[in-house]
Each structure stands twice: as C-alpha cells, then as structure tokens.
Amino acid sequence: MAMGATFVPLILSLFLLQIITVWAGRPFYPLPSKVADENRQSIQTVRPYNIAHRGSNGELPEETAAAYMRAIKEGADFIETDILATKDGALICFHDVMLDDTTDVAQKHEFSDRKRTYEVQGTNVTGWFTVDFTLEEIKTLRVKQRYTFRDQSYNWKFSIITFEEFIAIALDAPRVVGIYPEMKNPVLINQHVKWSDGKRFEDKFVETLLKYGYKGEYMSSDWLKQPIFIQSFAPTSLIYASNLTDSPKIFLIDDFTMPTQDTNQSFWEITSDSYLDYIKEYVIGIGPWKDTIVVPDKNYLTTPTDLVAKAHAHDLQILLEVCILIKSGLQQILRKMTQL
C-alpha cells in the first residue's frame, strides 16, 4: 500500500510537469480576466492616437503577427486590422475580400478551381475569395508585401492570422495597447457565409470582442483597460452592432465618388448636417479618407474642406489614417494633421 501510495503521486507529478513543459514552449495568451499584470503602462490620452494601420507594414507584410508586434515595439497606441470571414465562419485579419494580391494562392494548384466571380460593391470581380476557403486552407497560404517599392525580404514568411490571434497580440503587449478592428465588407460576408446558429457576421464580430473583455463607452474605466474602436464603411452594420455593445464606433467615409457599400448613399449625403446628426446617435466619430479633408492637386495640398469643422460641430471625433510613403512634404502633412 505504501509503495502504491507513493507511485501514484509520482506519476501525477511527472504528468503535470510534462503539461507545463508543453505550455512553456509556446505563447500562452490568457483571457483578460486572468491577466495578472495590473501595472502595465496605461494608454496615453493627452495627444492624438498613433494608430498602426495594418500594423507596421512599411517593412513587414501587412496584417501579419510580425507587423503588429513591430508596431507595438515602435510605440503604436492602437493596432488596426480588417476582419473578414472564412467559408467555415472563422474570423481572420485580411484587408481584401480576395486573396489574389498579397498571397501565394495563385501558385497553389489545389486551389485552381476556387476562382469565383462575385458582385462587390456594385462591380463584378473575379478572383479567389476568403469566403470560399476554410480556415485550415487559409492557414496554408503565405503573404507578401502589397507594394513593390517596399521591402520584399519578408515575402512568404508569414501566414494570415485570426481575429483571436490579433487580440492576443494586443493583450500580451508590455503596456496597454488598443485595437481598431474593421467589420470589412459585411454585405459580401453575410451573403456567402452562413453560421449554423443563424447569426450574422456582426454578431460573431462582437461576440469575439466580448469574449475577450472588450466593452465600455469611450474613456470609461473598462475602455481604458482595453481600449477599442469598432469601425466600418457600412452604417447599417454599425447601427446593428450598437445594439450588441457599447464600445465606441467609427463611421468610415470613402472618397467623394464612392457610395456606402450597404445603403448606396453618396458622400454628400452621408456628410450632410442632417445625416451627421442622425449617425452620431450610434457612433462617436468618423474616419474619412484623407483626400476628403485636404484635396490634393498635382501632388500639392490645397485648402482644407469643411468636413472636420462640420464633424466637430456635431460632437464627432475624427480618426484619420494616413500612410506617409515619401519624405517630400512630410512636415507640411504633419502640420495639416495636427490641426484636426
């Protein structure tokens, strides 16, 4: 009996040691409720936020784990991403509804029959769409730089990450880092992806955020612990999400010529005083395309439009994402931005 009593705890101890060793060999991202470090540096709120649009993608391929971790190291207040869905309903971080431009899908012979033609914002487009691939298939792809004038040395080294993996990167940062996820092309996603529980893309998007503790109105104690802005070009999706979460939302506004993807409203309609007065009941700000604020003319900046002043008159914040790719005119651009 004594020998048996000693043997069982020994086996149990060895089993637990093996589990701990396995866990130690990979990143482990606890849920927010399990995070023990209460001494992380808070997010700054005294100057405009530095938002890493698709991560630090000047050198590293956009929306990859490496690009987001680099952005955090470089001091980003928020990391921004685009959320799409796979055929089997997984939420992933990827900018385009098609995989053609920034992945090696065209070189994968097993996917040669997956090309489809779908209507995207009123135009028929042909290519390999994320909604026709399972998450397991998506994970076999590798990504590259979008632009040839950027560093090409990291091409094909990284895979597409999930929404949950993106969140884990933010939560694992050594200081508080916010997230800025976009509900990307919800019209297309809801047309082609069907969840077994009958829910829609916006439901799954918000459920993921709530699962990891993202909640609270702008500048509330909950928000300051895990800062977030939810963004979308689709006003109906933002209104729908408003019934699911009180996290702050940003209405994205495209170029002058682009109508809204879900309601087919013109730029002039959605920036009118009456519409801004309506949408402010659901969002705390707008995210306009930079050319609608300062219209370029032959690569020179012109007099700013009244869009910022109009938004401020309706108590709306401005979240502006600008990618500066050249040094020429940098100081002038920064001076314009500091006036927003």
Image: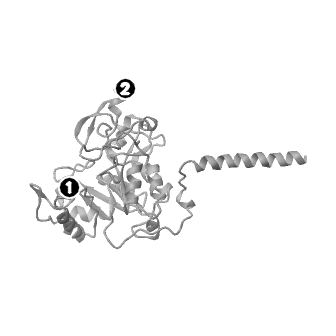
Q: Quadrant of residue 248?
A: bottom left
Q: Amino acid at mark 1?
A: Ile
Q: Amino acid at mark 2?
A: His
Q: Nearer the viewer, residue 20 or 82?
A: 20
The dot on residue 326 is 1
In the structure shown, which secondary structural element does the residue marked by tag 2 occupy?
Answer: helix
Q: Residue furthest bottom?
A: 46
Mark whose residue sits in front, 1 or 2? 1
Q: CA distance from mark 1 to mark 2?
A: 38 Å
The residue wearing badge 2 is 109
Q: Residue at x 40, y 46 (%)?
A: 201
Chain-order first, disc 1 or disc 2: 2
| Circles 1, 2 touching at the beta carbon (< 8 Å) | no
Position in image of residue 83 (x %, y %): 37, 48
Q: Check disc 1: other Cα within 10 Å, few if <14, some if 14-19, many if 20+.
A: few
Q: Is residue 38 above or below residue 60?
A: below
